[in-house]
Image (cartoon, helix red, strand yellow):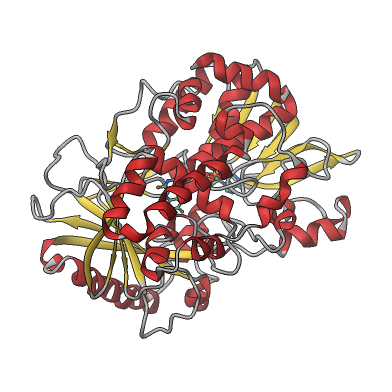
Amino acid sequence: MNQFDVIIIGSGLSGLQCGYILSKEGYNVCIVEQHSQIGGCLQNFTRDGCIFDTGIHYIGGLDEGQSLNRYFKYFGLMDKLNLKRLDEGAFDIINFANDPTDYKFAQGHDNFAETLAEQFPASRKALHDYTDKLREMCNHFPLYNLEYKNLDVSEMNFFSDNAFDYIKAITPDTKLQNVLAGTNPLYAGLPEKTPLYVHALVNNSFIESAYRVVDGSSMIAETMAASILQHGGTIMTNAKVDRFIMENGAISSVELSNKEVLSAKNFISSIHPARTLAMIEEKYLRKAYRERIMNLENTTSNFTLYVVFNQDSFEYLNHNQYYYKKDDVWLTHEDTDKDWPFNFLLITPATSRSDKYADCATIMAYMDITDVKQWENTTIGRRGADYNEFKKQKTEQVLDLVEQRFPGFRKTIKKVYASSPLTYRDYTGTVGGSLYGILKDCNDPLKTLISPKTKIPNLLLTGQNIILHGVLGVTIGSVTTCSELLGLEYLVKKIKNAG
Ligand SMILES: Cc1cc2nc3c(=O)[nH]c(=O)nc-3n(C[C@H](O)[C@H](O)[C@H](O)COP(=O)(O)OP(=O)(O)OC[C@H]3O[C@@H](n4cnc5c(N)ncnc54)[C@H](O)[C@@H]3O)c2cc1C
Protein backbone atom coordinates (compact mmCIF):
# COMPACT_ATOMS: atom_id res chain seq x y z
CA MET A 1 0.00 0.00 0.00
CA ASN A 2 1.31 3.48 -0.86
CA GLN A 3 1.59 6.12 1.80
CA PHE A 4 1.59 9.73 0.66
CA ASP A 5 1.37 12.97 2.59
CA VAL A 6 -1.30 14.27 0.24
CA ILE A 7 -3.35 12.64 -2.51
CA ILE A 8 -4.80 15.16 -4.98
CA ILE A 9 -7.72 14.05 -7.12
CA GLY A 10 -7.64 15.52 -10.63
CA SER A 11 -4.77 16.92 -12.68
CA GLY A 12 -6.44 20.06 -14.03
CA LEU A 13 -4.92 23.46 -13.32
CA SER A 14 -5.98 23.36 -9.66
CA GLY A 15 -4.70 19.84 -9.01
CA LEU A 16 -1.37 20.68 -10.62
CA GLN A 17 -1.08 23.96 -8.73
CA CYS A 18 -1.77 22.28 -5.38
CA GLY A 19 0.67 19.51 -6.34
CA TYR A 20 3.30 22.10 -7.24
CA ILE A 21 2.89 24.16 -4.06
CA LEU A 22 2.90 21.20 -1.68
CA SER A 23 5.66 19.21 -3.38
CA LYS A 24 7.84 22.33 -3.39
CA GLU A 25 7.25 22.54 0.35
CA GLY A 26 8.49 18.99 0.83
CA TYR A 27 5.16 17.12 0.93
CA ASN A 28 5.11 13.70 -0.68
CA VAL A 29 2.20 14.31 -3.08
CA CYS A 30 0.41 12.03 -5.50
CA ILE A 31 -1.92 13.41 -8.17
CA VAL A 32 -4.41 10.90 -9.51
CA GLU A 33 -6.01 11.58 -12.88
CA GLN A 34 -8.77 9.48 -14.43
CA HIS A 35 -7.71 10.09 -18.03
CA SER A 36 -4.62 9.00 -19.89
CA GLN A 37 -3.68 12.65 -20.44
CA ILE A 38 -3.12 15.15 -17.62
CA GLY A 39 -4.39 18.73 -17.61
CA GLY A 40 -8.21 18.64 -17.40
CA CYS A 41 -9.34 21.85 -19.13
CA LEU A 42 -5.69 22.57 -20.00
CA GLN A 43 -5.64 19.62 -22.38
CA ASN A 44 -5.14 20.03 -26.11
CA PHE A 45 -6.14 17.60 -28.77
CA THR A 46 -5.00 17.35 -32.36
CA ARG A 47 -7.16 16.84 -35.46
CA ASP A 48 -5.76 16.91 -38.97
CA GLY A 49 -2.51 18.34 -37.63
CA CYS A 50 -4.25 21.25 -35.85
CA ILE A 51 -3.93 21.84 -32.13
CA PHE A 52 -7.18 22.64 -30.34
CA ASP A 53 -7.46 23.99 -26.81
CA THR A 54 -10.28 22.48 -24.80
CA GLY A 55 -10.85 24.82 -21.89
CA ILE A 56 -8.31 27.64 -21.78
CA HIS A 57 -8.27 29.96 -24.75
CA TYR A 58 -6.90 33.14 -23.26
CA ILE A 59 -5.40 34.29 -20.01
CA GLY A 60 -5.50 37.72 -18.36
CA GLY A 61 -3.19 39.62 -16.01
CA LEU A 62 0.12 38.28 -17.30
CA ASP A 63 1.98 41.58 -17.73
CA GLU A 64 4.83 42.36 -15.35
CA GLY A 65 3.49 43.13 -11.85
CA GLN A 66 -0.06 41.96 -12.62
CA SER A 67 -1.64 39.28 -10.48
CA LEU A 68 -1.32 36.16 -12.66
CA ASN A 69 2.18 37.18 -13.76
CA ARG A 70 3.30 36.98 -10.12
CA TYR A 71 1.61 33.64 -9.59
CA PHE A 72 2.93 32.23 -12.87
CA LYS A 73 6.47 33.26 -11.90
CA TYR A 74 6.09 31.30 -8.67
CA PHE A 75 4.86 28.27 -10.67
CA GLY A 76 7.92 28.53 -12.93
CA LEU A 77 5.74 29.25 -15.96
CA MET A 78 6.53 32.78 -17.08
CA ASP A 79 9.82 32.00 -18.82
CA LYS A 80 8.62 28.66 -20.21
CA LEU A 81 5.45 29.69 -22.04
CA ASN A 82 5.33 31.08 -25.54
CA LEU A 83 2.67 33.77 -25.11
CA LYS A 84 1.01 35.89 -27.75
CA ARG A 85 -0.50 39.18 -26.68
CA LEU A 86 -3.93 39.76 -28.19
CA ASP A 87 -4.56 43.07 -29.98
CA GLU A 88 -4.13 45.87 -27.49
CA GLY A 89 -6.89 47.93 -29.06
CA ALA A 90 -9.31 45.00 -29.36
CA PHE A 91 -8.64 41.74 -27.56
CA ASP A 92 -12.36 40.99 -27.66
CA ILE A 93 -14.81 42.20 -30.30
CA ILE A 94 -18.53 42.13 -29.63
CA ASN A 95 -20.89 42.14 -32.60
CA PHE A 96 -24.65 42.12 -32.90
CA ALA A 97 -26.72 41.07 -35.90
CA ASN A 98 -28.08 44.04 -37.88
CA ASP A 99 -25.39 46.33 -36.44
CA PRO A 100 -22.14 46.63 -38.40
CA THR A 101 -20.21 48.20 -35.50
CA ASP A 102 -17.29 46.36 -33.93
CA TYR A 103 -17.48 47.00 -30.19
CA LYS A 104 -13.91 46.65 -29.03
CA PHE A 105 -12.53 45.74 -25.63
CA ALA A 106 -9.08 47.32 -25.35
CA GLN A 107 -6.32 46.42 -22.90
CA GLY A 108 -5.57 48.86 -20.07
CA HIS A 109 -8.35 50.45 -18.00
CA ASP A 110 -8.22 53.93 -19.51
CA ASN A 111 -7.74 52.51 -22.98
CA PHE A 112 -10.78 50.27 -22.43
CA ALA A 113 -12.97 53.19 -21.34
CA GLU A 114 -11.74 55.59 -24.02
CA THR A 115 -12.07 53.04 -26.85
CA LEU A 116 -15.72 52.38 -26.03
CA ALA A 117 -16.30 56.09 -25.41
CA GLU A 118 -15.64 56.66 -29.12
CA GLN A 119 -18.93 54.84 -29.79
CA PHE A 120 -20.64 55.93 -26.58
CA PRO A 121 -19.39 59.50 -25.96
CA ALA A 122 -22.27 60.35 -23.65
CA SER A 123 -21.19 57.50 -21.38
CA ARG A 124 -17.49 58.39 -21.10
CA LYS A 125 -17.70 59.02 -17.35
CA ALA A 126 -19.81 55.89 -16.82
CA LEU A 127 -17.15 53.86 -18.63
CA HIS A 128 -14.36 55.17 -16.41
CA ASP A 129 -16.55 54.59 -13.32
CA TYR A 130 -17.11 51.06 -14.59
CA THR A 131 -13.40 50.22 -14.83
CA ASP A 132 -12.86 51.78 -11.37
CA LYS A 133 -15.62 49.57 -10.03
CA LEU A 134 -14.05 46.44 -11.51
CA ARG A 135 -10.79 47.25 -9.74
CA GLU A 136 -12.59 48.02 -6.49
CA MET A 137 -14.36 44.63 -6.61
CA CYS A 138 -11.05 42.84 -7.22
CA ASN A 139 -9.52 44.61 -4.22
CA HIS A 140 -12.05 42.84 -1.99
CA PHE A 141 -10.10 39.64 -2.76
CA PRO A 142 -6.75 39.97 -0.96
CA LEU A 143 -5.20 37.17 -3.03
CA TYR A 144 -5.93 39.09 -6.23
CA ASN A 145 -3.18 41.46 -5.06
CA LEU A 146 -1.19 38.75 -3.28
CA GLU A 147 -2.05 39.98 0.19
CA TYR A 148 -2.46 37.54 3.03
CA LYS A 149 -5.55 38.85 4.76
CA ASN A 150 -8.43 36.40 4.91
CA LEU A 151 -11.58 37.51 3.13
CA ASP A 152 -13.23 40.05 5.44
CA VAL A 153 -16.66 38.74 6.38
CA SER A 154 -17.77 42.22 7.46
CA GLU A 155 -17.35 43.30 3.85
CA MET A 156 -19.42 40.40 2.60
CA ASN A 157 -22.27 42.62 1.40
CA PHE A 158 -20.43 43.16 -1.90
CA PHE A 159 -21.07 39.48 -2.66
CA SER A 160 -24.75 40.37 -3.04
CA ASP A 161 -24.20 42.96 -5.77
CA ASN A 162 -25.77 41.80 -9.02
CA ALA A 163 -23.82 42.27 -12.27
CA PHE A 164 -26.86 42.88 -14.49
CA ASP A 165 -28.33 45.47 -12.10
CA TYR A 166 -25.02 47.27 -11.66
CA ILE A 167 -24.45 47.60 -15.41
CA LYS A 168 -28.03 48.73 -15.93
CA ALA A 169 -27.64 51.39 -13.25
CA ILE A 170 -24.49 53.00 -14.68
CA THR A 171 -25.88 53.77 -18.14
CA PRO A 172 -29.36 54.10 -19.64
CA ASP A 173 -27.91 53.07 -23.03
CA THR A 174 -29.10 49.49 -23.51
CA LYS A 175 -26.60 48.87 -26.29
CA LEU A 176 -23.73 49.80 -24.01
CA GLN A 177 -25.21 47.65 -21.23
CA ASN A 178 -25.10 44.68 -23.57
CA VAL A 179 -21.63 45.51 -24.83
CA LEU A 180 -20.24 45.66 -21.29
CA ALA A 181 -21.77 42.26 -20.55
CA GLY A 182 -20.81 40.99 -24.01
CA THR A 183 -18.22 38.50 -22.76
CA ASN A 184 -20.97 36.68 -20.89
CA PRO A 185 -19.80 33.27 -22.24
CA LEU A 186 -16.73 33.64 -20.02
CA TYR A 187 -18.91 33.12 -16.97
CA ALA A 188 -22.30 31.95 -18.34
CA GLY A 189 -24.07 34.77 -16.54
CA LEU A 190 -27.73 34.81 -15.60
CA PRO A 191 -29.27 38.28 -15.19
CA GLU A 192 -31.06 37.48 -11.95
CA LYS A 193 -28.20 35.59 -10.29
CA THR A 194 -24.68 36.38 -11.46
CA PRO A 195 -22.82 38.42 -8.85
CA LEU A 196 -20.93 41.54 -9.88
CA TYR A 197 -17.71 40.12 -8.39
CA VAL A 198 -17.77 37.23 -10.90
CA HIS A 199 -18.16 39.66 -13.81
CA ALA A 200 -15.49 41.95 -12.30
CA LEU A 201 -12.80 39.37 -11.54
CA VAL A 202 -13.11 37.79 -14.98
CA ASN A 203 -13.23 41.01 -16.99
CA ASN A 204 -10.72 43.01 -14.97
CA SER A 205 -8.05 40.39 -15.43
CA PHE A 206 -8.41 40.48 -19.23
CA ILE A 207 -8.61 44.28 -19.33
CA GLU A 208 -5.25 44.34 -17.50
CA SER A 209 -3.75 42.29 -20.35
CA ALA A 210 -4.83 39.38 -22.54
CA TYR A 211 -2.70 36.58 -23.96
CA ARG A 212 -2.96 33.25 -25.78
CA VAL A 213 -0.56 30.38 -25.25
CA VAL A 214 1.01 29.65 -28.64
CA ASP A 215 0.55 26.03 -29.81
CA GLY A 216 -1.80 25.20 -26.97
CA SER A 217 -2.39 25.64 -23.26
CA SER A 218 -1.29 22.08 -22.44
CA MET A 219 2.21 23.55 -22.19
CA ILE A 220 1.10 24.89 -18.80
CA ALA A 221 0.22 21.37 -17.64
CA GLU A 222 3.39 19.83 -19.04
CA THR A 223 5.65 22.44 -17.43
CA MET A 224 3.98 22.14 -14.05
CA ALA A 225 3.96 18.34 -14.15
CA ALA A 226 7.70 18.29 -14.88
CA SER A 227 8.32 20.53 -11.85
CA ILE A 228 6.17 18.35 -9.59
CA LEU A 229 8.12 15.25 -10.61
CA GLN A 230 11.36 17.14 -9.99
CA HIS A 231 10.12 18.01 -6.49
CA GLY A 232 9.68 14.28 -5.89
CA GLY A 233 5.92 14.14 -6.49
CA THR A 234 3.99 11.36 -8.24
CA ILE A 235 1.42 11.74 -11.03
CA MET A 236 -0.74 8.76 -11.92
CA THR A 237 -2.87 8.72 -15.06
CA ASN A 238 -5.65 6.24 -15.91
CA ALA A 239 -6.33 6.41 -12.19
CA LYS A 240 -9.98 7.16 -11.54
CA VAL A 241 -10.91 7.52 -7.90
CA ASP A 242 -14.11 5.62 -7.19
CA ARG A 243 -14.46 6.03 -3.44
CA PHE A 244 -12.93 7.21 -0.21
CA ILE A 245 -12.20 4.63 2.46
CA MET A 246 -12.85 5.92 5.98
CA GLU A 247 -11.24 5.14 9.31
CA ASN A 248 -12.29 6.80 12.59
CA GLY A 249 -14.24 9.56 10.82
CA ALA A 250 -11.34 10.54 8.55
CA ILE A 251 -10.26 9.33 5.11
CA SER A 252 -7.51 6.74 5.18
CA SER A 253 -7.28 5.97 1.46
CA VAL A 254 -8.87 6.15 -1.96
CA GLU A 255 -9.91 3.21 -4.06
CA LEU A 256 -9.31 3.50 -7.80
CA SER A 257 -11.58 1.94 -10.40
CA ASN A 258 -8.99 -0.82 -10.94
CA LYS A 259 -9.39 -1.54 -7.18
CA GLU A 260 -5.92 -0.27 -6.32
CA VAL A 261 -5.88 1.43 -2.93
CA LEU A 262 -3.71 4.49 -2.21
CA SER A 263 -3.41 5.92 1.26
CA ALA A 264 -2.37 9.32 2.55
CA LYS A 265 -2.60 11.64 5.53
CA ASN A 266 -4.51 14.35 3.65
CA PHE A 267 -6.69 14.46 0.55
CA ILE A 268 -7.48 17.33 -1.80
CA SER A 269 -10.27 16.94 -4.29
CA SER A 270 -10.22 19.24 -7.29
CA ILE A 271 -13.31 17.71 -8.85
CA HIS A 272 -16.86 18.93 -8.46
CA PRO A 273 -17.86 18.96 -4.76
CA ALA A 274 -21.05 16.98 -5.50
CA ARG A 275 -18.97 14.27 -7.20
CA THR A 276 -16.52 14.34 -4.27
CA LEU A 277 -19.23 13.88 -1.65
CA ALA A 278 -20.83 11.11 -3.70
CA MET A 279 -17.64 9.08 -3.08
CA ILE A 280 -18.11 9.25 0.71
CA GLU A 281 -20.46 6.87 2.47
CA GLU A 282 -23.60 8.72 3.59
CA LYS A 283 -23.19 8.10 7.32
CA TYR A 284 -19.99 10.20 7.47
CA LEU A 285 -21.63 13.46 6.44
CA ARG A 286 -24.51 15.41 7.89
CA LYS A 287 -27.54 15.15 5.64
CA ALA A 288 -28.00 18.94 5.52
CA TYR A 289 -24.41 19.53 4.33
CA ARG A 290 -24.58 16.79 1.73
CA GLU A 291 -27.93 17.98 0.42
CA ARG A 292 -26.80 21.59 0.23
CA ILE A 293 -23.81 20.68 -1.92
CA MET A 294 -25.66 18.10 -4.02
CA ASN A 295 -28.50 20.47 -4.86
CA LEU A 296 -26.48 23.50 -5.95
CA GLU A 297 -27.24 24.75 -9.43
CA ASN A 298 -24.46 24.56 -12.02
CA THR A 299 -23.56 26.82 -14.91
CA THR A 300 -24.81 25.71 -18.28
CA SER A 301 -22.84 23.88 -20.94
CA ASN A 302 -21.76 24.38 -24.55
CA PHE A 303 -22.13 22.92 -27.98
CA THR A 304 -18.71 23.37 -29.54
CA LEU A 305 -17.41 23.19 -33.09
CA TYR A 306 -13.77 22.44 -33.83
CA VAL A 307 -13.17 23.69 -37.35
CA VAL A 308 -10.11 22.77 -39.43
CA PHE A 309 -9.56 25.32 -42.21
CA ASN A 310 -8.35 24.73 -45.73
CA GLN A 311 -4.79 25.97 -45.85
CA ASP A 312 -4.47 29.78 -45.75
CA SER A 313 -8.19 30.31 -46.22
CA PHE A 314 -9.21 32.06 -42.97
CA GLU A 315 -7.22 34.89 -41.42
CA TYR A 316 -5.85 34.46 -37.93
CA LEU A 317 -7.89 36.73 -35.62
CA ASN A 318 -5.79 38.19 -32.86
CA HIS A 319 -8.93 38.76 -30.82
CA ASN A 320 -11.91 36.74 -29.61
CA GLN A 321 -15.09 37.18 -31.57
CA TYR A 322 -18.41 37.38 -29.70
CA TYR A 323 -21.59 37.48 -31.76
CA TYR A 324 -25.25 37.86 -30.73
CA LYS A 325 -28.44 37.53 -32.70
CA LYS A 326 -30.23 40.07 -30.53
CA ASP A 327 -29.28 42.97 -28.30
CA ASP A 328 -29.47 40.69 -25.29
CA VAL A 329 -26.30 38.95 -24.24
CA TRP A 330 -27.56 37.41 -21.01
CA LEU A 331 -28.29 33.75 -20.82
CA THR A 332 -32.00 33.39 -20.23
CA HIS A 333 -32.64 29.73 -21.15
CA GLU A 334 -35.53 30.85 -23.32
CA ASP A 335 -34.04 29.74 -26.63
CA THR A 336 -36.42 27.58 -28.56
CA ASP A 337 -34.97 24.89 -30.76
CA LYS A 338 -35.71 26.93 -33.85
CA ASP A 339 -34.00 30.06 -32.51
CA TRP A 340 -30.91 28.23 -31.28
CA PRO A 341 -28.17 29.35 -31.06
CA PHE A 342 -28.61 32.92 -29.90
CA ASN A 343 -24.87 33.59 -29.86
CA PHE A 344 -21.41 32.22 -30.51
CA LEU A 345 -17.85 32.82 -29.41
CA LEU A 346 -15.22 32.15 -32.07
CA ILE A 347 -11.53 31.81 -31.27
CA THR A 348 -8.61 31.10 -33.59
CA PRO A 349 -5.77 29.56 -31.57
CA ALA A 350 -2.29 31.09 -31.92
CA THR A 351 0.24 28.86 -33.65
CA SER A 352 3.95 29.13 -34.35
CA ARG A 353 3.19 28.24 -37.99
CA SER A 354 1.54 31.46 -39.10
CA ASP A 355 0.49 34.86 -37.80
CA LYS A 356 -1.47 35.57 -40.94
CA TYR A 357 -3.72 32.54 -41.30
CA ALA A 358 -5.50 30.36 -38.77
CA ASP A 359 -5.16 26.57 -38.86
CA CYS A 360 -8.40 26.10 -37.00
CA ALA A 361 -11.12 27.71 -34.90
CA THR A 362 -13.17 26.78 -31.88
CA ILE A 363 -16.75 28.01 -31.92
CA MET A 364 -18.86 27.77 -28.80
CA ALA A 365 -22.59 28.21 -28.35
CA TYR A 366 -24.49 27.70 -25.11
CA MET A 367 -26.36 24.43 -24.82
CA ASP A 368 -27.94 22.91 -21.75
CA ILE A 369 -27.47 19.24 -20.89
CA THR A 370 -31.27 18.79 -21.02
CA ASP A 371 -31.03 19.22 -24.81
CA VAL A 372 -29.12 15.92 -25.00
CA LYS A 373 -31.05 14.15 -22.24
CA GLN A 374 -32.06 11.23 -24.45
CA TRP A 375 -28.41 10.15 -24.70
CA GLU A 376 -27.51 10.75 -21.04
CA ASN A 377 -26.86 7.06 -20.37
CA THR A 378 -24.43 6.65 -23.27
CA THR A 379 -20.65 6.92 -23.30
CA ILE A 380 -18.15 8.64 -25.60
CA GLY A 381 -18.08 7.15 -29.11
CA ARG A 382 -21.13 4.96 -28.40
CA ARG A 383 -24.01 7.37 -28.46
CA GLY A 384 -25.61 6.10 -31.68
CA ALA A 385 -26.60 7.34 -35.12
CA ASP A 386 -29.40 9.62 -33.90
CA TYR A 387 -26.93 11.48 -31.68
CA ASN A 388 -24.62 11.96 -34.64
CA GLU A 389 -27.56 13.26 -36.65
CA PHE A 390 -28.42 15.68 -33.82
CA LYS A 391 -24.84 16.99 -33.81
CA LYS A 392 -24.91 17.40 -37.58
CA GLN A 393 -28.07 19.45 -37.43
CA LYS A 394 -26.75 21.63 -34.59
CA THR A 395 -23.47 22.11 -36.45
CA GLU A 396 -25.39 23.53 -39.42
CA GLN A 397 -27.37 25.86 -37.15
CA VAL A 398 -24.18 27.24 -35.62
CA LEU A 399 -22.57 27.61 -39.04
CA ASP A 400 -25.63 29.52 -40.30
CA LEU A 401 -25.03 32.07 -37.56
CA VAL A 402 -21.28 32.19 -38.17
CA GLU A 403 -22.02 32.87 -41.86
CA GLN A 404 -23.87 36.03 -40.80
CA ARG A 405 -20.67 37.39 -39.27
CA PHE A 406 -18.17 35.84 -41.69
CA PRO A 407 -19.88 35.41 -45.09
CA GLY A 408 -18.35 32.50 -47.00
CA PHE A 409 -17.18 30.80 -43.79
CA ARG A 410 -18.39 27.37 -44.90
CA LYS A 411 -16.11 27.50 -47.94
CA THR A 412 -13.04 27.78 -45.70
CA ILE A 413 -13.81 24.57 -43.81
CA LYS A 414 -11.82 21.44 -44.45
CA LYS A 415 -13.38 19.49 -41.61
CA VAL A 416 -15.61 20.19 -38.66
CA TYR A 417 -15.95 18.21 -35.43
CA ALA A 418 -18.54 18.83 -32.75
CA SER A 419 -18.88 18.20 -29.03
CA SER A 420 -21.97 18.43 -26.84
CA PRO A 421 -22.60 18.89 -23.09
CA LEU A 422 -22.23 15.11 -22.77
CA THR A 423 -18.67 15.38 -24.05
CA TYR A 424 -17.83 17.92 -21.32
CA ARG A 425 -19.59 15.77 -18.72
CA ASP A 426 -17.62 12.67 -19.66
CA TYR A 427 -14.23 14.34 -20.10
CA THR A 428 -14.15 16.71 -17.12
CA GLY A 429 -16.50 14.98 -14.73
CA THR A 430 -18.48 18.17 -14.11
CA VAL A 431 -22.11 17.76 -13.19
CA GLY A 432 -24.30 18.20 -16.27
CA GLY A 433 -21.29 19.02 -18.41
CA SER A 434 -21.33 22.38 -16.68
CA LEU A 435 -18.78 24.79 -18.12
CA TYR A 436 -17.70 26.53 -14.94
CA GLY A 437 -19.14 24.38 -12.15
CA ILE A 438 -21.34 25.75 -9.40
CA LEU A 439 -23.39 28.79 -10.40
CA LYS A 440 -22.64 31.68 -8.08
CA ASP A 441 -25.80 33.38 -6.88
CA CYS A 442 -25.82 36.93 -5.53
CA ASN A 443 -29.21 36.27 -3.89
CA ASP A 444 -27.65 33.70 -1.58
CA PRO A 445 -23.90 34.24 -1.86
CA LEU A 446 -22.86 32.20 1.17
CA LYS A 447 -24.66 29.16 -0.16
CA THR A 448 -22.71 29.15 -3.42
CA LEU A 449 -19.30 30.11 -2.03
CA ILE A 450 -17.75 26.78 -1.16
CA SER A 451 -15.20 26.54 1.63
CA PRO A 452 -12.09 24.47 0.90
CA LYS A 453 -12.63 22.87 4.32
CA THR A 454 -15.13 20.03 4.49
CA LYS A 455 -16.83 18.22 7.35
CA ILE A 456 -14.19 15.48 6.97
CA PRO A 457 -11.08 16.63 8.88
CA ASN A 458 -8.47 15.55 6.31
CA LEU A 459 -10.37 16.37 3.12
CA LEU A 460 -9.96 19.74 1.39
CA LEU A 461 -11.62 20.97 -1.78
CA THR A 462 -10.07 23.05 -4.52
CA GLY A 463 -10.69 23.90 -8.18
CA GLN A 464 -13.10 26.07 -10.06
CA ASN A 465 -16.02 25.42 -7.72
CA ILE A 466 -14.65 26.92 -4.54
CA ILE A 467 -14.00 30.59 -5.29
CA LEU A 468 -14.20 31.15 -9.01
CA HIS A 469 -13.52 29.38 -12.30
CA GLY A 470 -10.94 30.43 -14.88
CA VAL A 471 -7.17 30.60 -14.59
CA LEU A 472 -7.30 33.47 -12.11
CA GLY A 473 -10.12 32.06 -9.95
CA VAL A 474 -8.62 28.59 -9.83
CA THR A 475 -5.17 29.99 -8.92
CA ILE A 476 -6.59 31.98 -6.01
CA GLY A 477 -8.49 28.84 -5.01
CA SER A 478 -5.39 26.63 -5.06
CA VAL A 479 -3.49 29.06 -2.83
CA THR A 480 -6.47 29.26 -0.46
CA THR A 481 -6.67 25.46 -0.26
CA CYS A 482 -2.94 24.91 0.28
CA SER A 483 -2.86 27.65 2.90
CA GLU A 484 -5.01 25.33 5.05
CA LEU A 485 -1.93 23.10 5.32
CA LEU A 486 0.86 25.67 5.08
CA GLY A 487 -0.54 28.88 6.56
CA LEU A 488 -1.65 31.78 4.37
CA GLU A 489 0.96 34.33 5.42
CA TYR A 490 3.80 31.86 4.92
CA LEU A 491 2.58 30.79 1.48
CA VAL A 492 1.89 34.30 0.21
CA LYS A 493 5.39 35.38 1.26
CA LYS A 494 6.87 32.47 -0.67
CA ILE A 495 4.88 33.39 -3.78
CA LYS A 496 5.80 37.07 -3.48
CA ASN A 497 9.46 36.24 -3.08
CA ALA A 498 9.42 34.19 -6.28
CA GLY A 499 8.46 37.24 -8.34
C1 LIG B 1 -14.99 25.53 -22.90
C2 LIG B 1 -14.27 26.25 -21.82
C3 LIG B 1 -13.51 27.35 -22.14
C4 LIG B 1 -12.80 28.03 -21.15
N1 LIG B 1 -12.02 29.09 -21.50
C5 LIG B 1 -11.27 29.70 -20.54
C6 LIG B 1 -10.37 30.75 -20.89
O1 LIG B 1 -10.22 31.08 -22.06
N2 LIG B 1 -9.67 31.35 -19.89
C7 LIG B 1 -9.79 30.99 -18.58
O2 LIG B 1 -9.13 31.58 -17.71
N3 LIG B 1 -10.64 29.98 -18.22
C8 LIG B 1 -11.36 29.33 -19.16
N4 LIG B 1 -12.19 28.30 -18.82
C9 LIG B 1 -12.29 27.91 -17.39
C10 LIG B 1 -11.11 27.08 -16.94
O3 LIG B 1 -10.68 26.22 -17.96
C11 LIG B 1 -11.49 26.22 -15.74
O4 LIG B 1 -12.17 26.98 -14.77
C12 LIG B 1 -10.29 25.58 -15.05
O5 LIG B 1 -9.35 25.10 -15.98
C13 LIG B 1 -10.77 24.44 -14.17
O6 LIG B 1 -9.68 23.80 -13.57
P1 LIG B 1 -9.95 22.69 -12.47
O7 LIG B 1 -8.63 22.18 -12.05
O8 LIG B 1 -10.86 23.22 -11.42
O9 LIG B 1 -10.81 21.55 -13.20
P2 LIG B 1 -10.51 20.61 -14.46
O10 LIG B 1 -9.58 21.23 -15.41
O11 LIG B 1 -11.85 20.18 -14.94
O12 LIG B 1 -9.76 19.35 -13.83
C14 LIG B 1 -10.41 18.33 -13.11
C15 LIG B 1 -9.66 17.05 -13.40
O13 LIG B 1 -10.17 16.02 -12.55
C16 LIG B 1 -10.21 14.82 -13.28
N5 LIG B 1 -11.17 13.92 -12.60
C17 LIG B 1 -12.52 14.05 -12.52
N6 LIG B 1 -13.02 13.05 -11.79
C18 LIG B 1 -11.98 12.27 -11.39
C19 LIG B 1 -11.88 11.09 -10.61
N7 LIG B 1 -12.95 10.51 -10.05
N8 LIG B 1 -10.65 10.54 -10.42
C20 LIG B 1 -9.52 11.12 -10.95
N9 LIG B 1 -9.58 12.24 -11.70
C21 LIG B 1 -10.80 12.82 -11.91
C22 LIG B 1 -10.67 15.26 -14.66
O14 LIG B 1 -10.41 14.28 -15.62
C23 LIG B 1 -9.86 16.53 -14.82
O15 LIG B 1 -8.61 16.26 -15.41
C24 LIG B 1 -12.89 27.59 -19.80
C25 LIG B 1 -13.64 26.46 -19.48
C26 LIG B 1 -14.32 25.78 -20.47
C27 LIG B 1 -15.10 24.55 -20.11
Q: Residue furthest right?
A: 248
Q: Position of residue 313 (x, y in %)?
A: 9, 55
Q: Position of residue 436 (x, y in %)?
A: 53, 54
Q: Residue furthest left?
A: 312
Residue 160: tell me if it is visible. Answer: yes
Q: Quadrant of residue 266?
A: top right
Q: Residue at x 60, y 32 (%)?
A: 143
- In the visual, does 15 lie left or right of 185? right
The relative height of residue 347 versus residue 23 in the rendered view (above or below) is below
Residue 35: tell me if it is visible. Answer: no
Q: Position of residue 324 (x, y in %)?
A: 33, 69
**Closer to the camera, 79 or 411?**
79
- In the visual, does 373 lie left or right of 52? right
Q: Residue at x 45, y 29 (%)?
A: 66
Q: Residue at x 62, y 17 (%)?
A: 493
The relative height of residue 82 versus residue 414 in the rendered view (above or below) is above
- In the visual, does 491 lie left or right of 427? right
Q: Residue at x 60, y 61 (%)?
A: 162
